[in-house]
Image (tube, grey):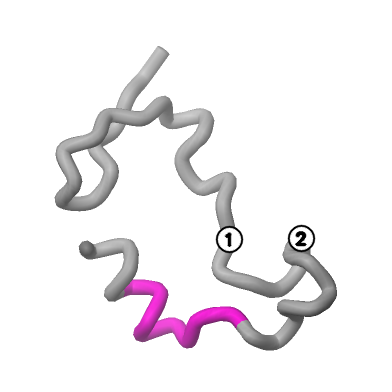
Amino acid sequence: MHYKTLGNTGLKISAVGLGCGNFGGVGSAPAFFGKGESEAEAFVLMDA
């Protein structure tokens, strides 16, 4: 299995699991539709 480092956290996670989360929209709870992060905010979170 291939592992990748998650951002600057030092955590190693499997490549299969990487990208399975989302920042709102399709697949999110209906109460959160349209309330996801902006593109800029999402990149800040991923770079943390």
Q: Characterize the local packing of mark 1: few (<14), some (14-19) or many (20 or more) Cα atoms within 10 angstroms.
A: few
Which numbered disc flags the more N-terminal residue, 2 or 1? 1
Q: Secondary structure at mark 1?
A: loop
Which residue in the structure is indicated by mark 1?
Answer: 22
Q: Is residue 42 magenta?
A: yes
In the image, what residue type sits under mark 2?
Gly
Q: Which residues are drawn in magenta?
A: 36-43
Image quadrant of residue 39? bottom left
Marks 2/1 in contact by CB < 8 Å: the verdict is yes
Quarter holding the C terminus is: bottom left
Q: Residue at x 37, y 82 (%)?
A: 41
24 to 41, vertically: above or below? above
Q: Characterize the local packing of mark 2: few (<14), some (14-19) or many (20 or more) Cα atoms within 10 angstroms.
A: few
Residue 7 spot, x, y in % from top left: 23, 51
Residue 19 spot, x, y in % from top left: 51, 47
Residue occupying the far right of the picture: 30
Q: Main secondary structure of the magenta part?
A: helix
Closer to the camera, 3 or 45?
45
2 horizontally vs 36: left or right = left
Image quadrant of residue 24? bottom right
Q: Residue at x 36, y 30 (%)?
A: 13
